Image (cartoon, rainbow, N blue to C red):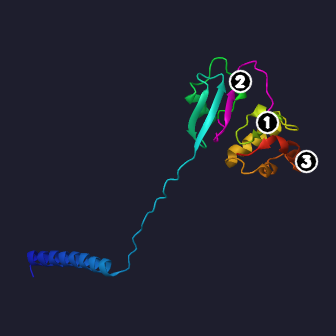
Amino acid sequence: MDRANLFRAATLALLLAIFGTGLAFLVIRATGPSDSLEIVLPEPTPRDEAVVYVTGAVGREGLYSLTSGDRVADAVALAGGLTNEADRARVNLAARVADGDHVHVPSVGEAVVGPTSEAAGALLDVNSATLLELQDLPGIGPIRAGAIVAFREASGGFQRVEDLLLVDGIGPTTLERIRPHISVR
């Protein structure tokens, strides 16, 4: 056999091998079990509406509609932002809002109002309370208030009042002392 015929034979063999491999692949794919991967995306869950009352040192006091879980900063932004008189250190802009929350932005020098009004039956929501509001609770100073805020931010918030026992520095005695003054929303 001369070189030209040998080359043609090798080329023909290579083409037949490629054709045979492709044909085998198609037959196996058509008759074999399906290993296809189906991706199912979760359906978006509707988020609850939260109507929040914003007062104090903001551009426009009033009721604002947000989504539960949005931040106090979102409510303040809808209310026209903080004014120059706002005491920024006394409002936790990172706190999450829930339906029915009252976000009050105090002015510099404004008297600190305790977290509860026994006469009105108001309770402090530990999931949205500021550091200063938490410090107004009996037996809660700056360190414990900071631990409460750090824990709720790391864990996504408290589900029930008893979850406060998971916070460093809060034991059963402290919990029972503050229980009449707090809520979890």
Q: Which residue is label 3 attached to?
A: 173
Q: Identify the residue shown where x is 89% and y is 43%.
A: 177
**Magenta region includes residue 99:** yes
Marks 3/2: CA–CA distance: 31 Å
Whichever of labels 3 and 1 marks the residue nearer the N terminus, that label is: 1
149 is higher (above) or lower (below) than 90:
below
Relative depth, front residue between 167 and 163: 163
Magenta extent: 94-115
| Residue 70 in view (yes/no) | no
57 is higher (above) or lower (below) than 29:
above
Q: Secondary structure at mark 1?
A: helix
Q: Which residue is label 2 attached to?
A: 106
The image quarter containing residue 60 is: top right
23 is higher (above) or lower (below) than 54:
below
Marks 3/1: CA–CA distance: 17 Å
The reply to whether discs 3 and 1 touch (Cβ–Cβ < 8 Å) is no
**Magenta region includes residue 143:** no
Give the amino acid type for the residue marked by disc 2 in the picture.
Answer: Pro
Q: Secondary structure at mark 3?
A: helix
Mark 2 crowd level (few <14, some 14–19, many ≥20, 10 Å Cα): many
Give the amino acid type for the residue marked by disc 1 in the picture.
Answer: Leu
Q: Which residue is label 1 attached to?
A: 134
